[in-house]
Amino acid sequence: MREVAIIGVGIHPWGKFPQKTFVDLGVEAIANALVDANIEWNKIETICSGIYIWGGNAGHLSGQYLASVFGETGIPIVNVYNACATGASALRLAYLSIASGQVDTALAVGVDMSPEGFLTAKSDNPRQDRDVLRWKMVGMPNPTYWALECRKRMGKYGTTHEDLAMVKVVLSQYGKENPNARYKKAYTMGEVLNSKMVCDPLRLLEVCATSDGGGALILCTAQKARQYTSKPITVAATTVGSAIYGDPTIRISALSAPAKAEAPLLSESYSSSQQAYRLSGIGPEDIDVLELPDNSSWHYLQYLETCGFGGEGEAERMLRDGETQIGGRIAVCPSGGFSSFGEAIGAQAIWQVAEIAMQLRGQCGARQVEKAKVGMAQTYGLMGNSGTTILKV
Amino acid sequence: MNESESQGKVVQALPDLFTWSKDGVHLMSARCGSCGTFFFPMYHEQHRPGCSRQGIEKVLLNREGMLVSYAIQYYMPPPPFKTDKDITPYIVGLVEFPEGIQIAGIVVSCAFNQLKLGMAMETTTFTLYQNEGGQDIVTWAFQPMKTL
């Protein structure tokens, strides 16, 4: 396998853009990445694109639609979908395309424009799509699942409402400094604790919104990377994980979970992170900056443990002691996280990796993590899929 | 089948998920004779890796279980969730059955301050809405065990 580097990152800021199309967002992200990498379009040798599920035929063939804007060149274009790990899956494919020796450069891109309000079922056949059951029979939006897991954690480890609120207080300070974030207001503990209850125990400011956004990464063999940039970022590992039998998580879209745990909670994310540690030879103790999927305050706490940054039940203490803040042992979500961005299914994993790359380049201004040398982007997706990327300089 | 259902007054919102028997409402599951895993819904198989998947039998779960988690939902979900009226705030509970499976469902007949992890629950039904023919369209639900 050949070493692979990121030479360009491009983002379309997160927000709501009803006047734009997903192609508009993707084109801006790609154009930014091309400029950032100082590479010409016709040097891109493959495109791995996240499927945009709300975009009909165009969304399912997002890579072809985006390529046609810049000019079709006959290269392999593959579109992938893995729920919220879609971008991670596109990135892994781009990485493998280069590492395997088939191509020297690749574009990984993900774009999303979320429909208004709650996401809901996309088919009406309960026999083949469990998603129909959870909506129709129980009325379970995604935050209900997070709330169920959060309540379990509160019962097990004594997590307090103040702990859940503190996640937002910390992340909102970072989001305020990030021009790409959708929410740029810093919140106080009182404001978070007084925000509306959405799904008890989780409040409005403790769950992420759904947003529009786009991200693009340009990868190249490490050998050729310096032709384009003086600061190539090495991809130490980029992996995808799926769930393990016996995972006790009440997984989004499921109506049941095993009573006896035979695998870790969030086993798909345990799987992807363990693969990444093994392949890179880098462990949690080596990582300076981490973007994790803070879909809710519960996720922030749980992912610290799932990915091995703390032992079971330690996350609340790590948060309270400032270990997870910029300047602490490990800077967690200095971008402001999903808390400040909101979910954009196909795009978020790409953006997380772009943020880590910018941190390692030292380009993050007020939210910069000093002397960051190794960073990790962790995402997760519905129905047991996840992605981990470890970058280093 | 209870009296109302036999008279056609009560209709399940979707079939093959729960049923009535003499002692009340039971969730319908299936158990794999090879790996021992219980499925819910029974038609969604989830075997242990390497299982031969032989000898799957339909089973009715115990009516009674234990509340292992709950959430209180303050916003009405979008369709296909359909109810006669706004039912928020409502409780979604996760109930662990003795067979070794936890199942989520709406919790009824329970005050918020009554909710406690570990409390005993029983399976029941909840009427989502009435259709044009005056039939109750129902789903499964849980309620606190009635103490004698």
Image: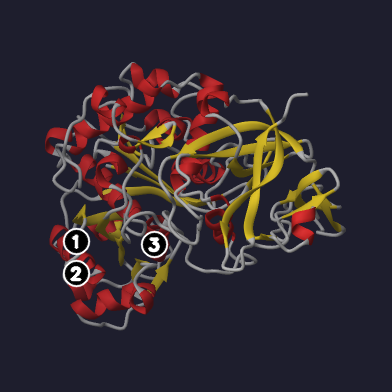
Numbered disc 2: secondary structure: helix
Q: Which mark is residue A17?
A: 1
Q: Quadrant of residue A325?
A: top left
Tag 1 near tag 2, CB within 8 Å? yes
Q: Chain of mark 3?
A: A
In the picture provided, is B30 more to the left or to the right than B17?
right
Amino acid of disc 2: Asp
Q: Which residue is mark 3?
A: A90
Q: Is residue A91 above or below residue A321?
A: below
Label 3 and label 1: CA atoms lie apart by 24 Å
Label 2 and label 3: CA atoms lie apart by 19 Å
Amino acid of disc 1: Phe
Amino acid of disc 3: Ala
Give coordinates of residue A277: x percent, y percent: 47, 40
Give coordinates of residue A22: x percent, y percent: 25, 68
Crowd around label 1: few <14 · some 14–19 · many ≥20 (10 Å): some
Numbered disc 1: secondary structure: loop
> Closer to the observer: label 1 or label 2?
1
Q: Residue at x 42, y 20 (%)?
A: A160
Pointer 2 or 3: first along the chain? 2
